[in-house]
Amino acid sequence: MPNFLTRFENDTLKIWGEHGIKQVAIWTNLVGPDADNLTHMLAWDSVADRKRKWNAFFAVPEWQEGKAASEKDGPINAKVACSFLSTTKLSAIP
């Protein structure tokens, strides 16, 4: 987890900002079977907006270099899951 958090601090968040990727929150799990998970929530205008900005982000050489440096001793990310959420009338958030 430390390498992953360092990569976010040193590379990812800056590049997200440069590409208009809006970070809502970033969490780590305190308890439970996935205690070493990192979860982040991003806000997108649309699925097309996400695709365009995400592809641009992954193409940035600075991010690719930061990723390679953080994984010099092996991969630091075992699994990635992506969901698009939509609120319901039951939600406190509109």
Image (spheres, rainbow, N blue to C red):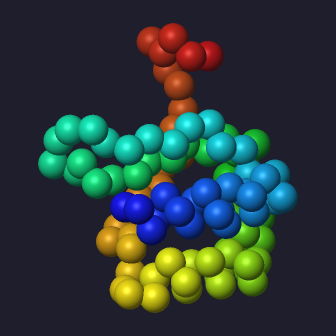
Residue at 61% x, 57% y is 9
| Residue 19 x/y as whole percent | 82, 59
| Residue 20 x/y as whole percent | 81, 52
Residue 49 location, quadrant:
bottom right
Which residue is the extreme one toward the left? 33
Q: Nearer the viewer, residue 14 or 84?
A: 14
Classify the position of the N terminus by image quarter. Answer: bottom left
Q: Nearer the viewer, residue 62 or 80?
A: 62
Q: Is residue 93 left or right of residue 82?
A: right
| Residue 90 x/y as whole percent | 45, 12
Q: Nearer the viewer, residue 46 or 35?
A: 35
Residue at 24% x, 48% y is 35
Residue 77 location, quadrant:
bottom left
Residue at 67% x, 66% y is 11
Instruction: Work out whether residue 28 can be spotted.
Output: yes
| Residue 25 x/y as whole percent | 56, 37
Residue at 51% x, 38% y is 85
Looking at the image, is 43 positioned above or below residue 89?
below
Residue 42 location, quadrant:
top right
